[in-house]
């Protein structure tokens, strides 16, 4: 029996129609944004997770958890990540936009 593959974008579009799903997803926006920024910093530096871990004096598993968004890093951890990737850490406060 052959299974039909459904593109993830199609599934996501359907899920977003559910108000509870959309609310939960939107609540995680900041975590997704932070995880994406950390991954992009590492990629910009041309580093693997293992290489970044060595520069930060930690383990690859810690980097994987940070990039997954499962843990919220401290400011000190973000400073270490920025230094290890040759980046500058910038934190800002922005007005909340009503949706």
Image: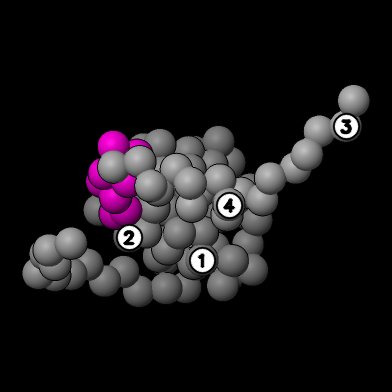
Q: What residue would you read off at disc 1? A: 40
In the image, is residue 40 part of the stretch drawn in magenta? no
Q: Is residue 17 left or right of residue 59?
A: left
Could one spot residue 72 in this view of the protein?
A: no
In the image, is residue 24 part of the stretch drawn in magenta? yes
Quick one: label 3 or label 4, which is nearer the N terminus?
3
Q: Nearer the viewer, mark 4 or mark 2?
A: 4
Q: Nearer the viewer, mark 3 or mark 1?
A: 3
The stretch in magenta equals 20-30
Quick one: label 3 or label 1, which is nearer the N terminus?
3
Q: Which residue appears at 35% of the width and 74% of the height? A: 88
Quick one: label 4 or label 2, which is nearer the N terminus?
4
Residue 76 x/y as whole percent: 28, 52
Q: What residue would you read off at disc 4? A: 10
Q: What residue would you read off at disc 3? A: 2
For disc 4, the neighbor class at 10 Å (few under 14, some 14 to 19, many from 20) is few
For disc 3, the neighbor class at 10 Å (few under 14, some 14 to 19, many from 20) is few
| Helix, strand or loop under label 2 | helix
Q: Is residue 79 above or below residue 12?
A: below
What distance separates the C-alpha of mark 2 from that of mark 1? 15 Å
């Amino acid at each position: 029996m052959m299974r039909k593959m459904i593109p993830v974008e199609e599934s996501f579009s359907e899920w977003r129609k559910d108000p509870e799903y959309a609310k939960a997803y939107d609540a995680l926006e900041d975590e997704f944004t932070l995880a994406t920024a950390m991954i992009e910093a590492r990629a910009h530096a041309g580093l693997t997770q293992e290489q970044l871990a060595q520069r930060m004096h930690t383990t690859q598993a810690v980097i994987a958890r940070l990039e997954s968004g499962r843990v919220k890093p401290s400011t000190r951890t973000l400073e270490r990540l920025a230094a290890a990737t040759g980046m500058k850490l910038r934190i800002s406060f922005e007005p909340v936009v009503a949706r």
